[in-house]
Amino acid sequence: MDLGGVIIFHGTDDESIPVAMSRTLAAQQKQAVRLIEIPNGRHNTLQLTHTEEIAKALKKIGESGF
C-alpha cells in the first residue's frame, strides 16, 4: 500500500539537531522523502519565522506532485 511520502523541513541553523541528521534520516528511508532545508531556520521557531518559504514549498509539491 502506498501511503505517499514524507516531507521533512529542517532549518540550517538548528542548534538542537544538526541538519546532517535529517539528511541521514532521509537517505535511509525506503519510502519517498523530500528534505527541504530552510536557510537560517532554527529548531522550534522554523514554522513561525519562515512561514512563506514553507508555504511556497508545500504549494510547489501540491502542484507538481511529490
Image (tube, rainbow, N blue to C red):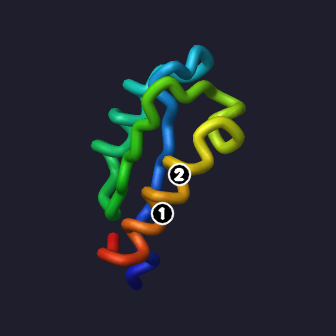
4 shown above or below 11: below
Residue occupying image coordinates x 63% and y 28%: 43
Q: Secondary structure at mark 2?
A: helix
Mark 2 Cα within 10 Å, few/some/many (few <14, many 20+)? some
Identify the residue at the far top of this view.
15
Which quadrant of the view contains residue 17? top right
Residue occupying image coordinates x 30% and y 75%: 64
Describe residue 58's horizontal placement relative to residue 31 as left or right. right
Q: Secondary structure at mark 1?
A: helix
Mark 1 Cα within 10 Å, few/some/many (few <14, many 20+)? some
Q: Position of residue 6 (x, y in %)?
A: 45, 60
- Give the quarter of the figure containing the C terminus: bottom left
Residue occupying image coordinates x 70% and y 31%: 44
Identify the residue at the far bottom of this view.
1
Which quadrant of the view contains residue 62? bottom left
Residue occupying image coordinates x 58% and y 15%: 15
Amino acid bearing label 2: Ile
Disc 2 to disc 1, how far (Cα)? 6 Å
In the rendered structure, find residue 39 and report the number of the disc placed on it. Answer: none
Describe residue 23's horizontal placement relative to residue 47 as left or right. left
Tag 2 residue: 54
Q: Nearer the viewer, residue 49 or 12?
A: 49
Q: Position of residue 8 (x, y in %)?
A: 48, 48
Circles 2 and 1, Cβ within 8 Å, touching? The answer is: yes
Tag 1 residue: 58
Amino acid bearing label 1: Leu
